[in-house]
Image (spheres, rainbow, N blue to C red):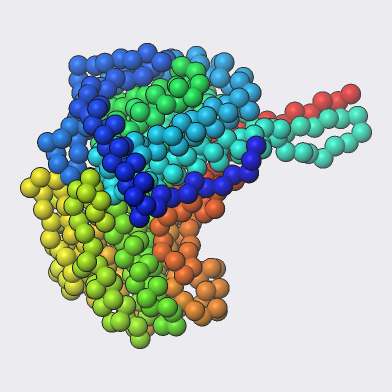
Amino acid sequence: MIPYKHEPLTDFTKEENRKAYEQGFEIVKEYLGQDVPLIINGERIMTEDKMVSFNPSDREEIIGNVSKCSRELAEKAMDVADETFKTWKKVKPEVRADILLRAAAIVRRRKFEFAALLSKEAGKPWPEADADVAEGIDFLEYYARQMVAMKDGVPLNQRPGESNRFGYIPLGVGIVISPWNFAFAIMAGTAVAAAVTGNTVLLKPASSTAVVAYKFVELMEEAGLPAGVINFVPGSSSEIGDYLVDHPRTRFVSFTGSRKVGTRIFERAAKVQEGQIWLKRVIAEMGGKDTIVVDSDADLELAAQSIVKSAFGFSGQKCSACSRAVIVEDVYDQVLERVAELSKDLTVGDPVEDKFMGPVIDKNSFDKIMEYIEIGKEEGRLVLGGTGDDSKGYFVNPTIIADLDPKSRIMQEEIFGPVVGFTKAKDFDEAIEIANNTDYGLTGAVISNNRFHIEQAREDFHVGNLYINRGCTAAVVGYQPFGGFNMSGTDSKAGGPDYLQLHMQAKSVSEVF
Ligand code: NAD
């Protein structure tokens, strides 16, 4: 197998790539607005009760009418996954891995179709959608190799007359619950990490981006994944969310989403249900309140560019987005001014037209962000933006709020929109203190030319993903394994060397001759 290398991003200055993206839209147009079934044991099941996935740039445009899984169908899917586990766990790891590699090849061939679908269903601008699909390919390629690398277990100490072996075996049925913001990469990555390790999966994608998840499950079938290994069960959280998490046959839950839902799942999964013979495992990747710290001795242009890209890329709807800029006072005004200057020229609009920023995902999100902007106006000084337009879709302009108290709500709560708060620190020590003063610990960045400050941040900036002299988004699978501390999750690292083990248990066998 050739060594892993991440998928390159598309260069959209090239005309042929722009054409290919346009063609992606043409392909997607063919199936927009269709009814989408559940997939249980390979069987397509269309339910009466549907949820509508629409285009957040234009809510009149329906992406798909997605069948909603009921409790009865969730139970059926659980039986299927339980039964399929008996055979899937015996399939050789190399064979499971090959299915992922084949799937990666198919996604690569349909890259622009998937990216265009993300532009339509999740409102992703072209480069963001392209990166989402590339990351999905990376997860497939990386986890396939990781599975093969760990298939023979780990060598143990041996004594004469004794053979000691140590290997990883799968867990059982996993519930994979994914968010809408990386509707392809995280959905695909979490589902295939569970499956390649020999588990079977009930995949419950975010309702707002269920069509792209359906297309991916179909693709996995095409790549050779046997029926019943990944079952597609979109549905309402109140009807099947708790039900699946609570189910006594659920062995583990792999969740990515908000802190509120993640902590709820963590609590519920801890309760041992009647008939349950294990303690459930929970892998939870949750929210963030991520900071870029700018030192007085720093490349200020790099600092401003990094803040703009990390705060406003995909309208700030990334768990890793920069929502706090903490600037040492000597350079505060200069950095703030430059960030405002760069941000006022950013384009906002329908991603079909290749704008820098698209819409936010839905009305709830739009209303929540606009409420935070009002709070921000009271807590600090509005420097840029503060406006939105929800007449057709859900657009919010890049917003900068300055002179905030580090403990203000804008500096503490996850907004998940294009809003960045600025705070002044008297020196670098105080800047790191402020950076660490939230409940979260996902990503962070430091822009500095001071070697001692860089080392100080390396030790004391308490985040799962720390970046030095770059922005705080855009982790790459296998290069920057991703996941956070504190209320950002269970300290797992997606796309990292120990991620697959979280879906397995170690068995130790000792034989005496
Ligand atoms: P969300 O928590 O609202 O929903 C996530 C998923 O959970 C969805 O599929 C939803 O249908 C499901 N869900 C909701 N209630 C449930 C319940 N009671 N039982 C089972 N499932 C339930 O999050 P979201 O709005 O889709 O995503 C945004 C959030 O995700 C942000 O907080 C962001 O920071 C976080 N996020 C974190 C990471 C990470 O790697 N740490 C990555 C992406 C997004």
Side (left or right) of 66 relative to 221:
left
Determine which quarter of the picture holds residue 446: bottom left
Residue 92 in percent (x, y) is at 64, 23
Total number of numbered labels?
0
Q: Is residue 90 above or below residue 490?
A: above
Instruction: Classify the position of the N terminus by image quarter.
Output: top right
Determine which quarter of the picture holds residue 23: top left
Determine which quarter of the picture holds residue 135: top left
Furthest residue in direction front, as rendered: 15
Q: Is residue 223 visible?
A: yes
Residue drawn 28% across and 41% down? 22
Q: Is residue 436 above or below residue 362?
A: below
Side (left or right) of 204 relative to 194:
left
Q: Is residue 438 above or below residue 270?
A: below
Of residues 270 and 114, the one nearer the viewer is 114
Q: Is residue 501 above or below residue 71?
A: below
Residue drawn 44% across and 34% down? 109
Residue drawn 41% across and 19% down? 78
Residue 191 in percent (x, y) is at 45, 32
